[in-house]
Amino acid sequence: MKRITRDEVKKVAELARLELNESEIQQHAEQLEKILDYIKQLEKINTDNIACTTRAIEVVNVLRKDERKDYENSDELLDLAPSREDKFFKVPKIIN
């Protein structure tokens, strides 16, 4: 018995505004079925004594002190921008 039907794939595709042909609908249904089978396998693993993690490897931020530095050719950089105002980059307003 299939857990993911073609109608369900069509419904999700419609909600996501995706246009899928019949071949793609079948392909996605099969792929989703394989994903659910894999999840079913993972659910069998005992994780009671395993600490929660957010990453597979530990990540450490390398931080430096923020320091202001003047740039000699700031006009050259500002001229590269689509728009500028005096000594600043001009960007569209996004907050009212």
Image (cartoon, rainbow, N blue to C red):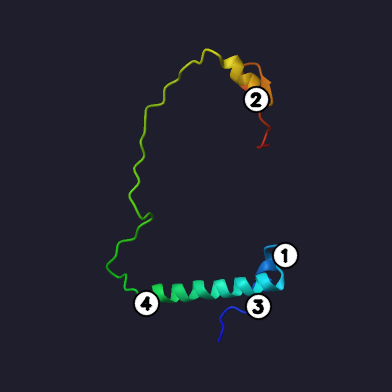
Residue 46: x percent and y percent?
31, 73
The residue pinned by badge 2 equals 81
Please report whichever mark, 1 or 4, sits nearer to the chain's N-terminal start.
1
Residue assigned mark 1: 19
Identity of the residue drawn at 36% across and 39% down = 61
Identify the element where label 2 is drawn.
loop
Q: In this rendering, would 9 be left or right of 37?
A: right
Please tell me which of labels 1 and 3 falls first in the chain: 3
Which image quadrant is residue 26 in? bottom right
* Residue behind mark 4: 44
Q: Are marks 3 and 2 in contact (CB under 8 Å)?
A: no
Q: Which residue is mark 3?
A: 6
The quarter in which the N terminus is drawn is bottom right
Structural distance between the alpha carbons of marks 3 and 2 = 50 Å
Asked whether, in this view, residue 1 is left or right of residue 83, the answer is: left
Answer with mark 4 or mark 3, whichever residue precedes in sequence: 3
2 or 1: mark nearer the eye: 1
Kind of residue indicated by mark 4: Lys
In the rendered image, the quadrant that contains the C terminus is top right
Mark 3 vs mark 2: which is more N-terminal? 3
Please tell me whether residue 94 is drawn above or below residue 12 in the rendered image: above
Separation of marks 2 and 1 at Cα, in angstroms: 39 Å
Helix, strand or loop at mark 3: helix
- CA–CA distance between discs 4 and 3? 27 Å
Q: Quadrant of the rendered structure where residue 55 is?
A: bottom left
Mark 2 vs 4: CB contact within 8 A: no
Name above or below for residue 80 compared with residue 63. Answer: above
| Amino acid type, residue under disc 2 in the picture | Ala
Give 25 or 83, whichever is nearer the viewer.
Answer: 25
Q: Is disc 3 surrounded by few (<14), some (14 to 19) or many (20+) residues within 10 Å?
A: some
What is the spatial separation of the Cα atoms under label 1 and label 4, in whole angstroms? 36 Å
Query: Which structural element holds mark 4?
Result: loop
